[in-house]
Amino acid sequence: MFLYLHGLNSSPASVKARQLAGVLAARGRQAEFSCPALPHHPVQAVALAESLLAGEEPGRVTLVGSSLGGFYAAWLAERYGCRAVLVNPATRAHAGLESYLGPQKNLYTGETWELTRDHLAGYARFAVQRPTRMERYFLMVTTGDEVLDYRAAVERFAGARQCVVAGSDHGFAEFGEHLEAVLAFADAPV
């Protein structure tokens, strides 16, 4: 199972989610893909992801999280013991999103909502202080990420498999070029 967790103000229509869904569909594996529309509040977002993981064998699950979705994926990987591909992940969402407090707009749906201190407190509940078992992680970052400092993720996930792309941006336009590596990581024996 591939569970794709999108970022803040994104949706299941994100380019990376569609690219992963497409490559899986081309291989007849579309039934293995899920990408829910995550609620804005972190407690609700994690609860939704946990409901989709219920009954799944951790060794057969690969979380793919982009930005804030990577933040959630790290917490879920630690809690459930599954693999996680972290794409330009937020490592400290509770601190990093403080400067974004206030009105928000989803880039895909146009929906507006308010990012509050209650959201930040919720993110703090899911912060992974010290990741364990680095072999369960595949970190994918771009050095040109204009939203997050890629070096924080590289340091936090030192010892994990890493793909560091020079340049690019937070959207990771080159993600499609690395899907074979994502699938190989997900399909490797545990």
Image: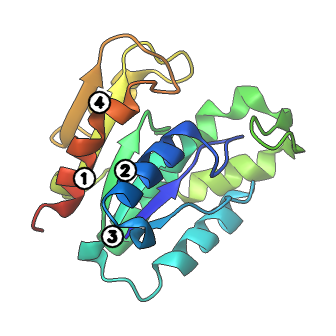
Tag 1 near tag 2, CB within 8 Å: yes
As drawn, 186 above or below 57 = above
* Residue kind at label 2, given as amino acid type: Val
Q: Nearer the viewer, mark 1 or mark 2?
A: 2
Q: CA distance from mark 2 to mark 3?
A: 17 Å
* Location of mark 1 (residue): 183
> Left of 173 or right of it: where is 110?
right
- From the image, tell me which residue sits under label 4: 154
Marked residue nearer the N-terminal end (2 or 3): 2
In front: label 4 or label 3: 3
Give whichever of discs 4 and 1 has the lower sequence position: 4
Q: Residues within 10 Å of mark 1 (few under 14, many from 20)?
A: some
Q: CA distance from mark 2 to mark 4?
A: 27 Å
Q: Of helix, strand and loop, which one carries label 2?
A: helix
Position in image of residue 12 (x %, y %): 62, 52
Work out how far the residue at label 4 is from the one at label 1, CA to CA, in angstroms: 21 Å
Q: Disc 1 vs disc 3: Cβ atoms closer than 8 Å?
A: no
Q: Which mark is residue 23?
A: 2
Q: CA distance from mark 1 to mark 3?
A: 12 Å
Where residue 81 sits: x, y (%)?
29, 70
Type of residue at label 1? Leu
Q: Going by the image, does 163 lie left or right of 116?
A: left
Give 43 or 1, whichever is nearer the viewer: 1
Q: CA distance from mark 1 to mark 2?
A: 9 Å
